[in-house]
Amino acid sequence: MPTFTLEDDCHTSLARLLEADEGHHLRFGWSGQSLGAADHGDLLIGTVRFRDYIMEGFLTYTVQAEDLRPGCLLRVAGEGSNRDWSIRPQIRHYIKAAGLIIRSEDNAEPSVAPDCGGIK
């Protein structure tokens, strides 16, 4: 699951990165749109699903934000497409195009711990 830690506070970062359209969907970058009505607060309390045109096709992914005070952590997860690898660079481009600074970036994938069978 790709994660991006942004320098600015979370509310400012989300406001610069995602805009609400007339139908109350969040717009992400040029072609990403939330599948249902959503606002910035929804990203802070759970995940929001987006559909985006990336690499000559549509991909669906979820985004969740965490207010780090200071900073903002964005978690992005694809839904199993063979093109999910292309989501991370697209999100990075959206962040930079919004004029935000990425403090750190990780592409950690959840793995199953052999001794307890859980996610670590």
Image: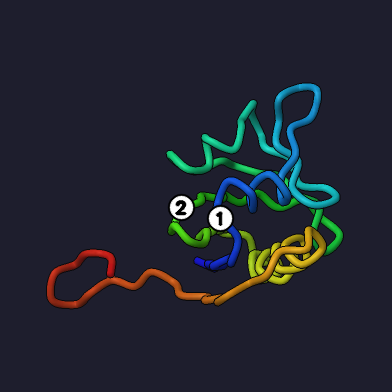
Residue ID at (76%, 67%)? 96
Asked which colour scheme the image uses, the reply is rainbow
Q: Secondary structure at mark 1?
A: loop
- In contact (CB < 8 Å): disc 2 and disc 1: yes
Identify which amino acid the numbered label 2 is placed on: Asp
How many numbered marks are there? 2
Q: Earlier in the sequence, mark 2 or mark 1?
A: 1
Task: Point out residue 91 in the picture as x, y percentages from the top left corner.
Answer: 70, 62
From the viewer's perspective, tell me whether residue 95 is left or right of residue 77: right
Q: Is residue 70 left or right of residue 57?
A: left
Q: Quadrant of the C terminus?
A: bottom left
Q: Quadrant of residue 94?
A: bottom right
Q: Position of residue 112 (x, y in %)?
A: 28, 71
Q: In the depicted view, which residue is nearer to us: 56 or 36?
A: 36
Q: In the image, is residue 101 above or below residue 13?
A: below
- Give residue 118's position: percent from left, percent from top: 22, 64
Q: Which residue carries the number 2 mark?
A: 67
* Mark 1 neighbour density, 10 Å: few (under 14) some (14–19) many (20 or more): some
Viewer-nearest residue: 29 or 110: 29
Quarter of the image where one finds residue 5: bottom right
Q: Which residue is mark 1?
A: 9
- Kindly report which numbered mark, 2 or 1, lies closer to the viewer in this rendering: 1
The residue under the point 64% across, 26% down is 37
Nearer to me, 91 or 7: 7
Q: Residue furthest left?
A: 115
Residue at 52% over, 58% down: 72
Looking at the picture, tell me which residue is in the foreground, 42 or 49. 42
How far apart marks 2 and 1 lie (CA) works out to: 7 Å
